[in-house]
Image (tube, rainbow, N blue to C red):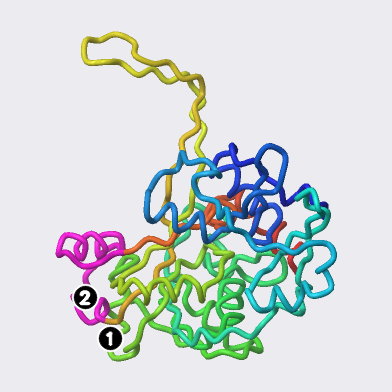
Amino acid sequence: MNVKDFLIDEECTMIEAMELLDKVAKKVLFVIQDGQFAAAITDGDIRRWILKKGNLDAKVKDIANYNPKYLLEKEKASAKEYMKKYSIEALPILNEENNIVSVVLWNDEEIETKKKLDVPVVIMAGGLGTRLYPYTKILPKPLIPIGEIPIVEHIMNRFNHYGSDQFFLVVNHKKNMIKAYFNEIEKNYEVSFVDEDKPLGTGGGLSLLKGKIDSTFILSNCDMLIEEDYEKIYNYHKKENNIITMVCSLKLMKIPYGVIVINEIGEIEEMREKPELSIFINTGMYIVEPIVIGELEDNKKVGFPDIIEKYKEAGEKIGVYPISENSWLDMGQMDVMEEMRRRLECDG
């Protein structure tokens, strides 16, 4: 990896910064002003900006920290100690002209720590998987393999990496196959099955967990993978005192047509050729307080977004945790399933 991979001009857009952060995968970029190092911008800076301002058209200079951490070449020997003190993953080393000559990175093994996210995880695994037909004619959606293991096991392994070791799978369609699979494999976590005798939707199935969960929990679909720091998401939820926090992914959508904006008297006000729209979409992962389970009607079909809407209308605090487009993989689409397979095999 080259130093220039970490550099971004302050006039670049926030969207460009998010894309570059995904590419370097180190959570920090160094901002150039008139050709010289001037600031740093992290994924946390961008997340705080979005949550505070809600403006996706911002530039890097609107968000960046112009009092960044760095060391001079003569101080480079103390870089690791300095990085440990300030919890920095990448540190720029400057020469006397204020130019970056190198970037010191933590070795992956050195920064890897055992996470302590002792939070139960509920996975909705009872759907028919109609988007993945004909695969799901043979296998239930959670057991469709991505590489050598099923997608739901990838999801559970990732949560387990962060410390979660208690999983509840709400099952319906081909549920005996799902149970048989998890009864056969070796695992260092506990899996409990919750039988859904009739389809209850992404929210209604939670009513079957009454008396089983009495703490904050994570709710996840069984066909998507979030590549983010789950501990950070959980801590944000608790800090904000949300009843539900929805994990939302940025999505760039290119309209394949020329878009015409018409004013109130029927004249053309603006013409945009194949514009790109930046929006946030629901990933299907949530941090949820246990009261949500307790207040659900038994055996009533309801979608989890409808539950969110009910609490929102009642004035309860619903939060959003934004992530980048590349941090979310939705296996429910055939083309994305292949992309997920490629990325997970590369990671392995």
**Where does the magenta region start and end?**
291-318
The residue that appears at 47% across and 41% down in the rendered structure is: 58
Residue annotated with mark 2: 296
Q: Earlier in the sequence, mark 2 or mark 1?
A: 1
Q: Can residue 298 be seen in this snapshot?
A: yes
**In this picture, residue 345 sits left or right of residue 138:** right
Quadrant hosting residue 36 = top right
Question: Does 199 sit above or below residue 41?
Answer: below
User: Label 2 to label 1, Cα distance in Å?
Assistant: 9 Å
Q: How far across and how far down the image is residue 99, in percent?
A: 78, 49
Q: Secondary structure at mark 2?
A: loop
Question: Does 256 sit above or below residue 28?
Answer: above
Q: Are marks 2 and 1 in contact (CB under 8 Å)?
A: yes
* Identity of the residue furthest to the left in this view: 314
Q: Secondary structure at mark 1?
A: loop
How many residues crowd around disc 2 within 10 Å: few (fewer than 14), some, or many (20 or more)? some
The residue that appears at 50% across and 72% down in the rendered structure is: 232
Question: Does 27 sit above or below residue 195?
Answer: above
* Identity of the residue furthest to the front in this view: 96
Q: Quadrant of the N terminus?
A: bottom right
Q: How far across and how far down the image is residue 193, in percent?
A: 44, 84
Question: Does 19 sit above or below residue 205?
Answer: above
Magenta run includes residue 293: yes
- The amino acid type, in three-letter code, at marker 2 is Leu
Q: How far across and how far down the image is residue 289, in percent?
A: 31, 78
